[in-house]
Amino acid sequence: MTVTRRHIQIVLGVLWLLDGALQLQPYMFTSGFAHQIIDPAATGQPAAVAASVHWAAHLIAAAPALMNTGFALGQLLLGAGLLWARTARWALAASIAWALAVWLLGEGLGGVAGGHALLLTGAPGAVLLYALAASLAWPRPTDQDRPGRRWRSDVPPSAWAAPVWAVLWIGGALLQVLPGNGAVAAIASSADAAPGPLASLDRTVASATTAYGTAMTVTLALVMAAVGLAVLAPRPWRSAAGCAGIVLALLFWALGQGAGLLTSGHSTDPNAGPLVVLLAVAVLGVRTDLIGSRPPRTETAGVSRARN
């Protein structure tokens, strides 16, 4: 099956509906949402980033039930808007704006600015990946010279999927080798919040690899860099990078992200793992013959080219 932008839109719609449902958990209507979920995102961040997170937490804590109701309804509307083809473009635009706001105010830029976030544990933040996936699923205009141009979503994802993928994984490799960002320590610490079976898996893996901490960290960084660089190579390497990225994303989701802590009652999203898989699907769906090509200048040419 050929992957299209519409497919990406539908998956994003389902994920936004999931986020909205998670936002309806009882805990989210209490001040604990502001003080225990939002406010800690400021820890270890630069002053400007920390200040924005503290401001958001203070605002939510003043009326947690009211604010959270708005958050839940907003995300449910985004999901519904993406699932309905007629409103998908507007929902994509709104989702990008919402995701970027949450990334700054609710996630503190995913902890990246503090230098201690890891792709293994969810960096650069799930909501930023929502925004990136939405940009890759943006409909393509069929005619750029007419104000009443039509938009098509039944075409492959944007060719920007490859550069976005490369930046994500190469950036993850760089974060991995920063001082204090050991892979084994990250897996061990994730056991504290992970569900029972995954917590046991985290402790087992951490215990088995403790003696090889440095080697594991360096090896993981090299593998991530390779996954990022290979996507810029010809098709066989691109496919290998996408498939390897899916495997790593699922491993990271289990070992470092506790499967998004979806059963904890405190989760606001499924974490980065599923979003990285979605980006991999977009990478695998890009047509190499469209990379670097200019958009068609007439509607007839655009329709013909999209169907080739």
Image (cartoon, helix red, strand yellow):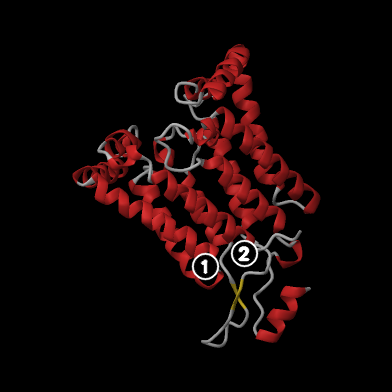
User: Of the residues under marks 1 and 2, which one precedes in the sequence?
Assistant: 2
Q: Quadrant of residue 38?
A: top left
Give the amino acid at mark 1. Answer: Ala
The C terminus - image quarter: bottom right
User: Which residue is identified by label 2?
Assistant: 6
Question: Please, what secondary structure does the residue beneath circle 2 have?
Answer: helix
Q: Position of residue 6 (x, y in %)?
A: 62, 64
Vertical relation: 31 (above or below) 242: above
Q: Which residue is mark 1?
A: 88
Crowding near the residue tagged with mark 2, few <14, some 14–19, many ≥20 C-alpha atoms within 10 Å: many
> What is the three-letter code of the residue carrying label 2?
Arg
Asked whether 240 or 14 is in front, the reply is 14
Q: Secondary structure at mark 1?
A: helix
State the residue lying farthest toward the right.
Answer: 236
Q: Does 160 sit left or right of 179 as displayed?
A: right
Q: CA distance from mark 1 to mark 2?
A: 9 Å
Give the residue drawn at x 31%, y 51%. Answer: 69
Answer with left or right where residue 246 lies relative to residue 252.
right
